[in-house]
Image: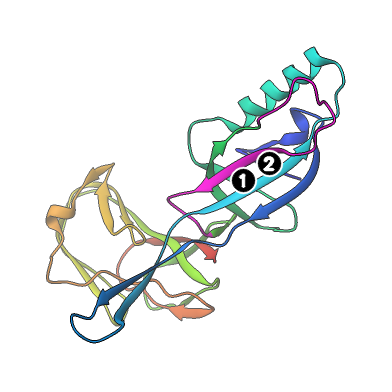
Amino acid sequence: MITYSGVNILDVAPVKIEDIVVSPIRLNPVARQRAIAFGAEFVRMGGGTRTVTISFALLTKDTADREQQLQNIRDWASNGTESALVLPDHAGKHLECICTQLPEASFRKWWENKLRLEFTCFSNPYWTADTEQEAECGETPFQVNGSAPPLMRIERTLSEPATAQEYHSGEQIMTFSTIPAGKLTIDITRQTADVDGVSIMQHYDPNSEWIVPTYGGQFQTIGGIGQIRFCERWV
């Protein structure tokens, strides 16, 4: 089963899947070249995009029907935004990607089996859990599995403004001088904070330290007031 944005490809055209190739995340090492000596000083490892290539056949002889089915496939893949792509044998996980190559079909060779769709993961190249988990801020530890940093945020609804608010993990402390009334969302992954969609990063103390989420089966505690929501991810 291959679904994109919640729609199965077999529901739009009778394709015969030949192969699915998921590339690894492109690694982008950062290094500092030595001025005199040979070699370079390794700084850190970064990561880029990953692609998913789906090869298929469309064994429809009638040219009009075949073209309509190809149009259905193009419409299915081209929604203009990054969406969830679910692939076989990856239960409970999906990739967030956008179509970057549509099939190039022959008008004559209806039997061709090298038609290709290519999807690219830009903002989130990791395998991401379908189910979002919840935990409460406080003293109770919660476990985060996966082999990559999770998508994590803190949510809280304030009926009136609050001052001198802290969120801490035991190693890092995030401090906000003021949080206005409304729905607070602190995006741990992207390091942003807003109330009702309006940024409040001007109230964040730059001398404090942003919380770093744990993963790999480790337990973490985040002190403060609010609810933690997270999705585990894998390389």
Is 137 left, or right, of 172 in this rendering? right
Is 89 left, or right, of 229 in this rendering? right
Query: Taking 15 as reference, is 97 above or below it?
Result: below
Q: 138 or 210: which is nearer to us?
A: 210
Residue 99 horizontal/vertical position (percent): 55, 38
Amino acid carrying label 2: it is: Thr
Quickly name the residue at label 2.
3
Q: Is residue 117 magenta?
A: yes
Query: Taking 213 as reference, is 176 above or below it?
Result: above
Q: Quadrant of residue 182?
A: top left
Q: 158 or 34: which is nearer to us?
A: 34
- What's the magenta region? 104-126
Residue 193 horizontal/vertical position (percent): 26, 54
Residue 140 horizontal/vertical position (percent): 43, 77
Q: Earlier in the sequence, mark 1 or mark 2?
A: 2
Looking at the rendered image, the quarter that the N terminus falls into is top right
Q: Residue at 25% of width from left, 49% of height from top?
A: 194
For the residues labelled 1 and 2, the Cα–Cα distance comes to: 6 Å
Query: Taking 221 as reference, is 12 above or below it?
Result: above
Given the current orientation, which residue lies at the most extreme bottom position? 37
Mark 1 element type = strand
Q: Residue at 54% of width from left, 79% of height from top?
A: 217
- Residue 85 tag number: 1
